[in-house]
Image (cartoon, rainbow, N blue to C red):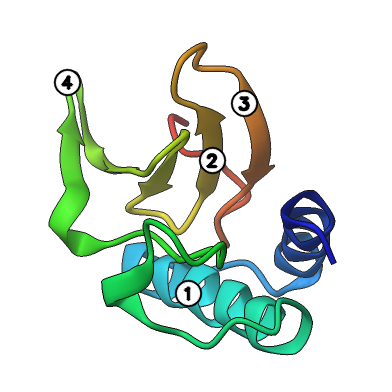
Amino acid sequence: MTKRERLVEFYKRLSLAPTAKDHDEAFTLIETILNAVEDELSGIPYDLAASQTDGRLYPPSPMFVRKVPGHPTVLRYRQRGHSTLIGQNGAIEIRIAETNEMIFSKHGADEKGVFS
């Protein structure tokens, strides 16, 4: 499958998964689902050292976490072409880095969004 097709599958599985109740649960949900999709559909073994060139999709890394100014309950994980935002309430948003266009959104268990 292409990266695009695997991303579609990731978003589908993430949207169908139970909502997270906090940041850590949301982070784990993203990590678990993305790694499962890649393990099943990419044919590329997990190798963080090769992440820039191997063609596999990798979950956000705590090494690239940033605070969001004016939103103390939101953390932003910067990745190659996008940012993953996770709220303290378990809500998730994925945005294109260059344009800030939202490409995925999932409420937290409190039924509120990342910035709610």
Q: Kindly state the secondary structure of the residue where label 4 is placed.
A: loop
For marks 3 and 4, give the one nearer the viewer: 3
Q: What residue is shown with label 4?
A: 69
Callout 1 crowding tier (Cα within 10 Å): few <14, some 14–19, many ≥20: some
Identified by mark 2, the residue type is: Glu
Q: Kindly state the secondary structure of the residue where label 2 is placed.
A: strand
Q: Gap between marks 1 and 4, in whole Å?
A: 25 Å
Q: Gap between marks 3 and 2, in whole Å?
A: 7 Å
- Residue 45 location (% of width, % of height): 53, 88
Image point (40%, 40%), residue name: 80
| Numbered tag placed on residue 102 in the rendering | 3
First in sequence, mark 1 or 4: give its number. Answer: 1
Identified by mark 3, the residue type is: Met
Front residue of 67/73: it is: 67
Cβ atoms under marks 2 and 4 closer than 8 Å: no
Q: Gap between marks 2 and 1, in whole Å?
A: 14 Å
Callout 2 crowding tier (Cα within 10 Å): few <14, some 14–19, many ≥20: some
Q: What residue is shown with label 2?
A: 93
Q: What residue is shown with label 1?
A: 31
Front residue of 112/92: it is: 92
